[in-house]
Image (tube, helix red, strand yellow):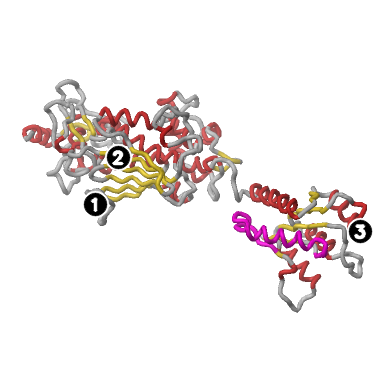
Amino acid sequence: MKIFISSVQKELAAERKALAAYLSGDPMLRRFFEYFLFEEQPAADQRADQCYLDQVDRCDIYLGIFGNEYGREDAEGLSPTHREFNRATEKGKSRLIYVKGVDDSVRHPKMKALIADVGSSLIRRRVNSAEELIAAVYASLVRILEERELIRFGPFDATFCRNASLDDLDEDKVTRFLVLARRGRNFPLPENTPPHEVLVHLNLLDKDRPTHAAILLFGKQPQRFLITSEVKCAHFHGFEVEKPIPSYQVYKGTVFDLVDQAKDFVLSKIDLWVGTRAESIQVPTKYEIPQEVVAEAIVNAVVHRDYTSNGSVQVMLFKDRLEVWNPGTLPPTLTLEKLRGPHASVPHNPLIAEPMYLTKYIERMGTGIRDMIRRCKKAGLAEPEIRIDGGFFVLTIRRKKSESETQSGLGQDQVTPQVTPQVTPQDTQQVTPQVRALLGAIVDVPRSREELQEAVGIKDREHFRKAYLEPLLTVAWIERTIPDKPTSRLQKYRLTEKGRRLLEQLAGGE
């Protein structure tokens, strides 16, 4: 925005010069404003008074500094300052008027009349020095930036998402949230509540526009507006970041999608031990890193990250450790040491955290790190390591030194760790532990899609369909109970003879 700094009276030369220097030197203001100061203009073949008025026409803000002098009068008895003010008023410009001094008795009569005229139509501010002028102008310009929604003072997730509208929200995702929230925390709104009412209830609208939190939670394409909100996942066979990367995925979607997809990525790469039904009708399974720890590490990174950063959440699995990096630092009230003990929950993005809490993705009691420490110890792992590194919060979970030799605690009925992350129609000779757990879940009774997802610990429906369900149907290891109605709500899946023989072969090879 362009600011026209009025007044050419010699008595105010120091104030104009100081103000111009401040506007050009302040890191924030110079991003948004440029100014016109007549003294800095080069010589030109143009009348001075016409130059003034042309610049007023081009400006966004007229900034008038009025002193004691009135200025040289033209044929109509008006000074340049008076004409500039009239032109700015005529053109509907934003006007900021500052009057130096409080003693009006010493002013030129016409300047006194101009000040009185100004006071009848807008708020003027009196100042006594260049320092007071700068402070007053700064406050006014910041207010303008805030009113025009170019800067924000509230939490990032509570401010509106620029260029987004209600059409950019997915109503089905809002409805799915209602189902999970009612089941998880007894959310009061019924499942048939209109999406707009849900958004209002969750404080996700700003003047009926979606906030950043609304887009991240329920957007059709959140990364269209917040490109770095994606999660990058990489799996390395060694101990350091090296190319080529054996497995690399960039996940996009809502925060719910990001958490589910990133968690599934890690679980598909780490070791899983599968037991038998000797002690339970359910097939016992156990990951080398407890899946609750993996989920907690990822959800904390996605929910509490700094979304104003140009960085993205990174999930990196190495031979000896899992590292989760998220842009941001701790709030002033917390330290790395305090995180390991009892502490209050201080969410970086409270409007994102609340729906994640309601759907039981997170707790809000500040117990996340302590729960991870407890679960890691119970699994025989070292305590998670936390540090701040180059503007990123880094959580490291150490893997066991020799996964293939580690005892699972499930008795003697265990299989070797996974060979490949998933089974595909092109590679039916290698069976992952997740696939074995899925097949084992339907040995005796058909199961629904939801039950099978739970059996292998996969939350993301689309990932489960593409990586597990469709490949197993293709190789005929499982089949639908209602084959002529694939999308029936009563659909279940059962083991085929081919799948049963496979399980017998696997059991015989133990």
414 drawn magenta = no
Which label was assigned to residue 246?
A: 1
In this view, the residue in front, 503 or 54, is: 54
Lower sequence index among marks 1 and 3:
3
Residue matched to label 2: 264
The picture quadrant where one finds residue 106 is: bottom right
* Residue under the point 22% across and 31% down: 286
In this view, the residue in front, 316 or 108, is: 108
Residue matched to label 3: 108
Magenta segment boundaries in residue numbering = 8-35
In this view, the residue in front, 151 or 384, is: 384
Report the side of 68 relative to 378 (left or right). right
The picture quadrant where one finds residue 25 is: bottom right
State the quadrant of the C terminus: top left
Q: CA distance from mark 1 to mark 3?
A: 81 Å
Q: Secondary structure at mark 3?
A: loop
Tag nearer the camera, 2 or 1: 1
* Badge 2 amino acid: Asp
